[in-house]
Image (cartoon, rainbow, N blue to C red):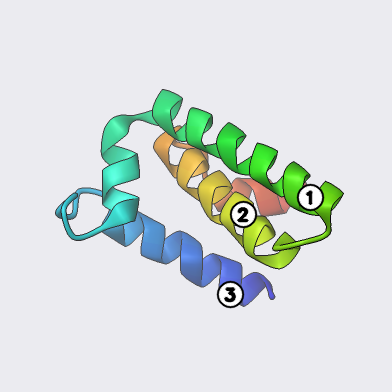
Amino acid sequence: MLDTIEKLVKTIRLRKGSDIKSSYTAHLLSKGSNYCLNKLKEEVTELEDAIKNKKNKVHESADVIYHLLVTLESAGINFDDIVTEL
């Protein structure tokens, strides 16, 4: 499982600076960390609703993980440091 997340982290890093018209990740990163934080908060709210309403929990969970990783990248927080801390 960690391999999958590490691959996603690498993909997010590679998308940084890419064409924002062809990469949603590049678009998010181009907006800065405050934008990414707000998007993450939105996704957490959607996950909360999904859990309460017992639908789309897996999809919304995946969205939260993706947006968390994008937010970490936008803030310059190294995922390897987080794994070490865990």
**Would residue 33 be found to the left or right of residue 56 on screen?**
left
Q: Position of residue 12 (x, y in %)?
A: 39, 57
- Residue 21 marker: none
Residue 5, how many percent across, how many down?
A: 58, 67
Q: Could you tell me which secondary element the residue under label 1 belongs to?
A: loop
Comparing labels 1 and 2, the label whose residue is closer to the camera: 2
Q: Image point 58% across, 74% down: which residue?
A: 4
Q: Position of residue 41 (x, y in %)?
A: 60, 33
| Residue 65 disc label | 2
Q: Dot 2 lies on which element?
A: helix
Identified by mark 2, the residue type is Ile
Say which of 75 and 39 sits in front: 39
Task: Report how far apart the C-alphas of labels 2 and 3 lie in the structure.
Answer: 12 Å
Of circles 2 and 3, which is in front? Answer: 2
Q: Which residue is mark 3?
A: 4
User: Mark 1 to mark 2: distance in Å?
Assistant: 16 Å
The residue under label 1 is 86
Query: Mark 1 or mark 3: which comes first in sequence?
Result: 3
